[in-house]
Image (spheres, grey):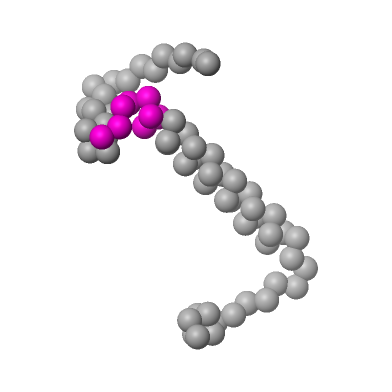
């Protein structure tokens, strides 16, 4: 398991302490969750980009059709 040291300025330290208390999570867990969420965002963007690029004749529907 890797051990990583992170330096935070005062504002970042206050934010991390607030989040830790708010979510009742230790600070390392918050970093891990943030890392996974950022990675998931990137994977979602890649999926969307690939889907759009590979579609030769995109088919659009109206919002009204989508809600019906």
Seen in the picture, residue 54 relative to 3 is either above or below; the reply is below
Horizontal relation, residue 24 to residue 31: left or right: left
User: Was residue 28 drawn as part of the magenta stretch in this picture?
Assistant: yes
**Location of residue 34 in the rendering, given as x and y in whole percent from the top left corner:** 42, 36
Residue 12 in the image: above or below residue 5: below
Q: Residue at x 26, y 24 (%)?
A: 13
Considering depth in this image, is 28 or 65 the residue closer to the camera? Answer: 28
Residue in the picture at 30% in, 32% down: 25
Residue 21 in the image: state x and y as whole percent: 22, 33
Start-end of magenta stretch: 24-31
Looking at the image, which residue is at 39% across and 17% down? 6
Q: Is residue 3 above or below residue 16?
A: above
Q: Tell me which corner region of the image, top left, top right, bottom left or bottom right, holds residue 56.
A: bottom right
Left or right: residue 24 versus residue 54 is left
In the rendered structure, does residue 41 fall within the stretch colored magenta?
no
Q: Is residue 5 in view from this perspective?
A: yes
Number of numbered callouts drawn: 0
Image coordinates for residue 54, horizontal then vertical, percent: 75, 60
Q: Residue at x 50, y 85 (%)?
A: 68
Magenta stretch mostly in which secondary structure? helix
Q: Is residue 15 visible?
A: no
Image quadrant where residue 5 sits:
top left
Residue 9 x/y as whole percent? 29, 21
């Amino acid at each position: 398991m890797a051990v990583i040291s992170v330096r935070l300025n005062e504002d970042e330290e206050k934010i991390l302490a607030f989040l830790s208390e708010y979510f009742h999570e230790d600070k390392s867990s918050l970093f891990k969750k943030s890392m996974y969420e950022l990675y998931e965002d990137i994977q979602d963007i890649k999926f969307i980009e690939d889907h759009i690029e590979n579609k030769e004749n995109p088919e659009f529907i109206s919002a009204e059709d989508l809600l019906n």
